[in-house]
Image (cartoon, rainbow, N blue to C red):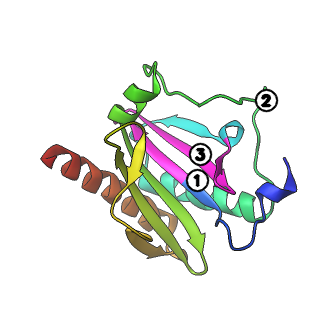
Amino acid sequence: MDDYLYDTPGYCHHGLNVDLVNKKQILFIPVLHSNMISEAAVIFDYPMGTEEIGRLIFQFFKQMKQRNLTLHSPYKNYWFMPKGIRSFKKYVEATFSVTLEWDGDIFGVYRWFPAPDRGFTVEGPGSYNVTINNSVAAKELGEFILQQFDYIERKRQRS
């Protein structure tokens, strides 16, 4: 992987999208230099334990900091679609999505909602929707992510 993706000072923090799809699968996609690295993405059946969710998040950030993301073979340069999803439109409709960015001693969290035209749009203007200290235990981080999915679901139901 090109080194420039790991380090672009002042442009983008290391990030991780965590997407809950159809409440049946959970997808982890690293984001470097505003690029989703699909060849490093992983997907698991859901539900899964909160501690395991948090552990995977910490593992991805550790790999990004060490410039050592685990890439899967064969190389995938297409969008990673979960089971039963045949289009990006269906993916957006079926997905609760959050992005975590490593920012000093916190994770900044963006919550994503379906955009009026296509794709996702971040909730509200400006910076992070919420933050959490990145020294929390894996279980606490996993519980926090599930709370964000619950928040997105409730807000989408009200819309």
Q: Position of residue 106 (x, y in %)?
A: 53, 77
Question: Mark 2 or 3 closer to N-term?
Answer: 3
Task: Say which of marks 3 and 1 sits in front.
Answer: 3
Three-letter code for the amino acid on which mark 1 is drawn: Leu
Q: Is residue 8 visible?
A: yes
Q: Which residue is most to the left?
A: 158
Q: Report the Cα–Cα distance between label 1 and label 2.
A: 20 Å
Q: Position of residue 142 (x, y in %)?
A: 44, 59
Numbered range of the magenta stretch: 17-37
Q: Is residue 22 visible?
A: no
Q: Quadrant of residue 61?
A: bottom right
Q: In this rendering, is residue 136 above or below 28?
A: below
User: For mark 2, what is the residue?
Assistant: 73
Question: Mark 1 or 2 closer to N-term?
Answer: 1
Residue 56: assigned label: 1
Q: Secondary structure at mark 2?
A: loop
Question: Mark 3 or 1 closer to N-term?
Answer: 3
Q: Which residue is most to the bottom?
A: 105
Q: Position of residue 4 (x, y in %)?
A: 83, 58
Asked whether the residues under the numbered discs 2 and 3 touch, taking CB atoms below 8 Å apart as contact, a structural biologist would say: no
Q: Residue at x 58, y 53 (%)?
A: 56
